[in-house]
Image (cartoon, coloured by chain):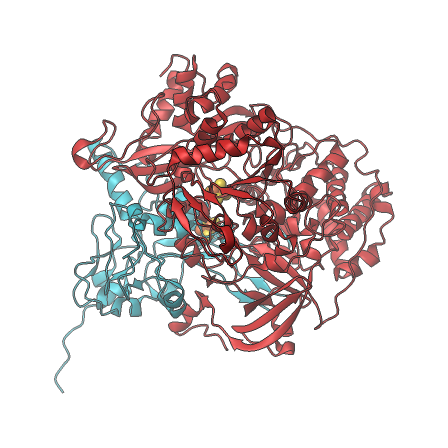
Chain colours: A red, B cyan
Amino acid sequence: MTDKLSRRDFLKVVGAGAATAAVLTGCGPASRYVTREPYTKMPEYNYNGQSTYFATTCRECAAGCGLIVRTMQGRAIKTEGNPYHPVNLGKTCARGQATLQGLYNPDRLRNPVRNSRGESYQTGEKDWTEINWDTAIEVVAQALKDPAGVQFLLGPAPDHLFDLVREICKTIGAPAPIRFGALGMFEARVTLGEAARAMFGRPDTLFFDLANADLVISFGANFLETWISPVAYTRGYSKMRKQRTRGILVQLEARLSQTAAKADLWHPIKPGSEGLVAAALGKLYAEQKFGIAPAAFEAVDVAAAAEAAGLQLEALENLTALLLDADRPLVIPGGAALAHEHGLEIAKAILALNALLGNLGKPGGVFHTPVSPLGEEYRRPASLREMAELVERMKAGKIKTLFVHGVNPVFELPQALGFQAALEKVPTLISFATFPDETAMLADYILPDHHGLESWGYQRVTDGTGQAMLSGAQPVVAPFYNTKSTVDVLLAAAGLPFKDEVEYLQNQVAPLVEQTGGFYSAADLPSFWALFQQFGGWWKNDVSLSAPNAAGATEKKLNLKAVEASEQHEEFHLLVYPSPILAEAGANKPWLQEIPDPMTTVMWNSWIEINPHTAEELGLHNDDVVRVVSPFGAVEVSVYKYPAIRPDVVAIPFGQGHTAYGRYAEARGINPADLFGPNFNEAGDLAFADLKVRIEKTGKKRELSRLESKLGVYGEGMEEH
Amino acid sequence: MASLPKIPEYKAEWAEGEAGRWGIAIDMDLCTGCQACVAACSMENNVPFVGEHDAGYGRQMAWIRVERLWEGEYPEVKATPFQPVMCQQCGAAPCEAVCPVFATVHSQAEQINLQVYNRCVGTRYCANNCPYVARVFNWADYSNYPEPLANQFNPDVTVRRRGVMEKCTFCIQRIHKATDQAKAEGREVRDGEVQPACAQACPADAIVFGRLDDPESKVSKLSKDKRAIKLLEDLGTQPRVTYLKGGYHGNLG
Ligand code: SF4
Ligand code: SF4
């Protein structure tokens, strides 16, 4: 302990006590790893029957929640939320809980390998040969010698690996690394960022202060499931409900999602009408409140907007009354709402509505996220259009070596983008995957990174909390297999002057030692580093959210269109939503597979949700297999008659349908991304919510495993078939 | 006709009193149905997964499930508020009376319902008699995981094998740890000092655990809230889990 850590803080640490005992720091600032030792020779901080706890960061999604992992005799036993971490304050989602099943998954990659793909590449046959790490590093070093031909494709989280790769690429003159994750695609994050740039002059994913709002209108934002930072937004939701006057939630989306199930009011509006509805609400609100509507909303025809949304005019008037009644109203744009051809205009309309409601920078309103304490401009994952450009460069033979880490593009990208086919034009694909995922199976080399719980690191976290922070990660157990940290591989291959990953990290966090206003402070780097591990990161005590610039936000004209109505029975709008439990990468964890979907209670598989009336008209029953055909692909999947979805819309969750990725994921369900076409909105995000599909009977039946029917076994609620 | 022997009054024999010791309050207005509690419970208590086929056959092993039902028809359709249901730790537990080998018994110290795995012979009478469908049965040796998945087993909790009944224990291993600690320090367990895995994980803070015999505890106060209800209370089971009604009847009229 340093003298700068006050006695009170020290007691706080110790007082974490009963629940979390003491949170240890690796084994002192300088040491590299914790070691798993036999009972007879235990490290000094380990006692028989006593657990050791380590603070780290959850890597199951890009939200960056803090974890405390309970270990015993060198094994990780249980993950809990880190009670001090500003994002999740001690809580986790189901995926965070199941992260140990990634660590101890029987299908993890255990050694670096080379695939002599040669002729057999086309057929997908593999001939894996184990190599040693020296050879692996040499391979990477050789590839880096041709900087113009190098491209890094990384996962969505802005972490220390991203910082390092950016530096390397800058130094050697290679193109900047690209970050991508399917969740970002489903959240249309780029569109949100671009809308913020257009309206407030600063691109940002924005912070929506749910906790203090008394009325929330959400355009399909699934913030209780996977949206941006679900644990943080769930806490916001909970606080909103617990206010003296219970906050109201209104959800506008075509399907009653898990989030919509918590709403006081749900209107199943037509996909594509979100912008018109927002503008109509703006017009009605402004006319009643100020007597005149600003430029952004004046052109909208309220009756036509209601018609386009499939709503009664009365419903819009009631919503307006709620808005007029509310002290702190807030409107949130969900991903699917922006995933339309004119999605950017929709996002702008929703932000303009917030500006009109006067909530920018006010409690319960919209804020700019804090700037990372390491200093940075807005850095976002790639849009789908940028991914398409990457594919073009691959096809043109411009990329000689593609490095992939933390993302599985063969599975996550729409097939119509042609990523897999373009790989044939890439001479060398090097994957750093921990699991034999679809992309790794096509690689020439797999140089497996450690699992997140075996790794050092940090992550810049700006979403979900108003406190500027850096989330810290450390190994909670020694690496299980012959894997190697990708940072170490790159440091060695690029010949950078750092001894190892830890030295690199210490160098990166060094500027924080000087900063004031933090949760703790230390006199020197080694002490700071110890505290950084102990608390699982560093953050400022004060909230530093800033008010977006409202000037002119409601004065810009918007170009809003309705999408053409689909002809009943012929074509249906397809709504693809990320599975709340599996999200983009959970399918390889058996316990996540067996957790019932919150709305359908289906386990271990995929399904298509169809309104019961539509199903009846089509002559479909539960568990009937249908063929879902889009202009770009087709999938076969079992029917779930979903009582709360528009009759002209069908929905399929994303997360299943792997052709690799280990025994628990492989050959299970279907991947709805196979149906997507390469249609983008103005911001470059995939306009996936515009997609229409046909539904064909197959005459087959495949029974879904549902928890619901368990109750049936005991007599109640037996489903008709 | 010979006179029947006098059968003791069921409740007088088995009921432990109205108060109870440990209890849970679940706010259904806050629960978002996210299933973090389900995952957390399974990880803490070595609850196995059974695979797609058995799960569909009603053999899923989770000790806690989140119920939702549908009401009405489109477009006037609603999902009822999510309701996490686990063993209600009845003060007068119907399961206990029917176990022929006393495998499910009431603990005097914790006043909760215990399952003694090595006594259980798998008659499943208890599951049959549980009005809350809280009990799950090991139809196979589900915990024979491929290596090294078993590394994450919690050493504080027994791994069950085939033919044994199991259910939520209110994380009794955590209660024991906290009580021992308090005892060693010569004090009572503090409110909030011990939390079962579900309550600890719940991102919405919907689950509150604590001492029912301490009128000042959070859970005691919530149990007396005007929104408080108990599941199937009229059966006289004296459930130790309280639900706080929530959902649509709020301020929208
Ligand atoms: S929200 Fe994301 S980071 Fe947080 S616990 Fe869940 S998976 Fe982990
Ligand atoms: S963790 Fe909490 S919010 Fe999530 S399902 Fe369980 S009780 Fe509900």
In the image, is residue A543 above or below residue B67? above
Total numbered circles: 0
Q: Position of residue A201 (x, y in %)?
A: 75, 31
Q: Is residue A308 left or right of residue A505?
A: right
Q: Nearer the viewer, residue A162 or A541?
A: A162
Q: Quadrant of residue A327?
A: top right
Q: Position of residue A88 (x, y in %)?
A: 48, 37
Q: Nearer the viewer, residue A703 or B24?
A: A703
Q: Nearer the viewer, residue A144 or A51?
A: A144
Res. A23 in view:
yes
In the image, is residue A369 above or below residue A266? above
Q: Position of residue B214 (x, y in %)?
A: 32, 42
Q: Position of residue A159 (x, y in %)?
A: 52, 32
Q: Quadrant of residue B193?
A: top left
Q: Is residue A698 left or right of residue A103?
A: right
Q: Residue furthest front?
A: A119
Q: Is residue A533 left or right of residue A163?
A: left
In the image, is residue A696 above or below residue A517? below
Q: Residue at x 81, y 38 (%)?
A: A554
Res. A155 in view:
no
Q: Residue at x 69, y 53 (%)?
A: A678
Q: Quadrant of residue A454?
A: top left
Q: Residue furthest bottom?
A: B1
Image quadrant occupied by the N terminus of chain A: top left
